[in-house]
Image (cartoon, rainbow, N blue to C red):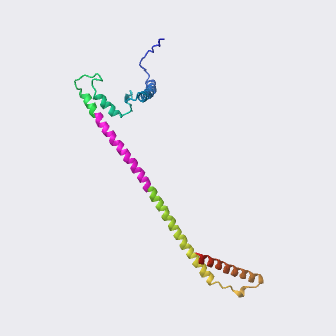
Amino acid sequence: MDRNKIMRKKIEDPVSRQQFYLKCKDIIVKKSDELGFLCNSNIALLMVSQNGEVTSYSRGESFEDIMVKAMNQPVQLNRRSIPNPDEEHLMQSLVQSKSERGMIEKIAMYDTLLFSSSFILIYFFVVVLFYMIEKFLLFLLGVFTMLMIGQRASVLSSYEPQVENINTTEEADAYKEYILGAIERVQRSKVSISKS
């Protein structure tokens, strides 16, 4: 069974070329991930588009670790034994990138910790603030109630019906019911105060 060979040629249209690159890039990354998972191997993948967009992917260890290991094994990469200054510079850049990545990961960890502790501190502050507001409002309610009770007491203690203005028995009965109701309310509040 022979496979048909596909003729490959450069895609001339830049838009089509970019679309094809994006499609194939995702497929290559997916296949690299599958290969690394199935074969339990470390994979470092670096792709640069024509626009300069860099895509790096690593499976297993970090990209820098894999590249440093590869650079340290010249025989397996079929490299010449004469040192190349570009390779040495690349090696130094990879080592520096690895240490910078470690520092960035530590900063991100501390930043997350700082954010969560700041959030807890703000939450605590808001809870304390609401608690203080509630206590202050209860205090104001108590003061207002005391003022109202004091005002009522002064009104009730000075209440004297003007008997000379009562002209009918209905008015007299209304005054009598009002005074008896007030006495009953005073008795109930007296009982409730003595219970507490």
Q: Which residues are magenta?
A: 93-121
Q: Residue at x 24, y 26 (%)?
A: 84
In the depicted structure, whether residue 125 falls above or below residue 41: below
Place of residue 133 in the rendered image (x, y in percent of width and height, measured from the top left): 50, 64
Q: Is residue 189 left or right of residue 49?
A: right
Which quadrant of the rendered structure holds the C terminus?
A: bottom right
Which residue occupies 39% across, 49% down? 113
Q: Nearer the viewer, residue 21 or 69?
A: 69
Q: Main secondary structure of the magenta part?
A: helix
Q: Position of residue 145 (x, y in %)?
A: 57, 73
Q: Identify which residue is drawn at 30% across, 31% down.
A: 68
Check if residue 4 falls in the magenta segment: no
In the foreground, 141 or 38: 38
Q: Identify the residue at horizontal 54%, vertical 72% (top origin).
A: 142
Judging depth in this view, the residue of 81 and 162 nearest the camera is 81
Q: Kindly tell me whether residue 57 is visible in this rendering.
A: no
- Give 148 or 184, whichever is nearer the viewer: 184
Tell me if 189 is positioned left or right of 137 in this view: right
Find the residue positioned furthest to the right: 169
- How many marks the image carries: the answer is 0
Seen as rendered, the residue at the extreme bottom is: 164
Q: Is residue 140 above or below residue 161?
A: above
Q: Is residue 101 magenta?
A: yes
Residue 122: where, in percent of width, then height? 44, 56
The image shows residue 58, relative to residue 143, as above or below, that is above
Quadrant in which residue 55 is drawn:
top left
Q: Do we see residue 176 in this rendering? A: yes
Indicate the position of residue 141 as horizontal and vertical percent values.
55, 70
Report the residue that reaches farthest toward the left.
82
